[in-house]
């Protein structure tokens, strides 16, 4: 069956469209994406790569910024200084320089649990780990952190302790190798 879903970019409309598509229906979704609502958070999508969706409907939204190119380390550090947490939704990875840079700056990280990323992030302590390609889990993890300032602060403090004076501190790592 072919079904038209209006408001497909919204919370309810997107869920309905997703469930209908899973059921095997052909779904046509429409919505009026604009900047009517003031956003309490901003989203910066940074890094070079192939876009798997049409970004043009989001270009008018002042709370979403796309930087689709290689990000040099100095610029990455500047972006990280401006953020509350980092999101790395990889579908495949062995390790991530973005995650390590985020952690050295005491920024919690939400990432997919692929490759060795699960070894870099302590789920619930220094960020969150989600299954790959699970957009609902990704959205839930991001919204959870956005809605809990105390949790974000605690994660940042845990990262500071672990990475600047604990097991991940370079001086402590060097001492282990030299002893």
Image (tube, helix red, strand yellow):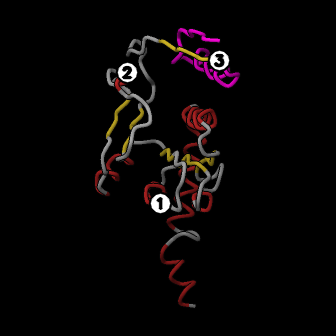
Name the residue beneath numbered marker 3: 25
Residue 57 has which mark? Answer: 2
Task: Tell me whether circle 1 and circle 2 mark residues in contact (CB < 8 Å).
Answer: no
Q: Quadrant of residue 45?
A: top left
Secondary structure at numbered mark 1: helix
74 or 96, which is in the foreground?
Answer: 96
Count residues near mark 3 (Cα–Cα under 10 Å), then give few for <14, some for 14-19, many for 20+.
Answer: some
Q: Which residue is mark 1?
A: 100
Report how far apart the C-alphas of labels 2 and 3 lie in the structure. Answer: 24 Å
Q: CA distance from mark 1 to mark 2?
A: 32 Å
Q: Is residue 114 magenta?
A: no
Residue under the image location 60 percent in, 42 percent down? 151
Give the CA distance from mark 1 to mark 3.
42 Å
For marks 2 and 3, the one nearer the N-term is: 3
Residue 18 located within the stretch drawn in magenta: yes
Q: Depth check: give the residue in front, 61 or 83.
A: 61
Residue 56 or 107: which is nearer the viewer? 56
Q: Taking 109 as reference, is 51 above or below it?
A: above
Q: Residue at x 37, y 43 (%)?
A: 46
Q: Which is more foreground, mark 2 or mark 3?
A: 3
Q: Are marks 1 and 3 in contact (CB under 8 Å)?
A: no
Q: Residue furthest bottom?
A: 179
């Amino acid at each position: 069956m072919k079904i038209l879903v209006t408001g497909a970019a919204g919370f309810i409309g997107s869920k309905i469209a997703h469930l209908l598509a899973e059921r095997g229906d052909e779904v046509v979704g429409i919505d009026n994406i604009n900047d009517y609502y003031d956003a309490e958070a901003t989203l910066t999508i940074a890094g070079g790569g192939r876009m798997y969706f049409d970004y043009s409907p989001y270009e008018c939204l002042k709370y979403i910024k796309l930087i689709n190119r290689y990000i040099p380390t100095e610029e990455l550090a500047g972006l990280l200084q401006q953020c509350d947490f980092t999101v790395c939704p990889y579908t495949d990875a062995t390790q991530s320089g973005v995650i390590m840079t985020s952690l050295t700056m005491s920024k919690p990280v939400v990432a997919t649990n692929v490759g060795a990323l699960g070894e870099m992030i302590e789920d619930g302590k220094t960020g969150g780990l989600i299954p790959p390609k699970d957009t609902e889990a990704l959205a839930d993890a991001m919204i959870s952190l956005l809605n809990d300032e105390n949790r974000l602060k605690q994660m940042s403090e845990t990262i500071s302790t672990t990475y600047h004076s604990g097991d991940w501190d370079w001086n402590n790592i060097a001492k282990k190798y030299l002893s």
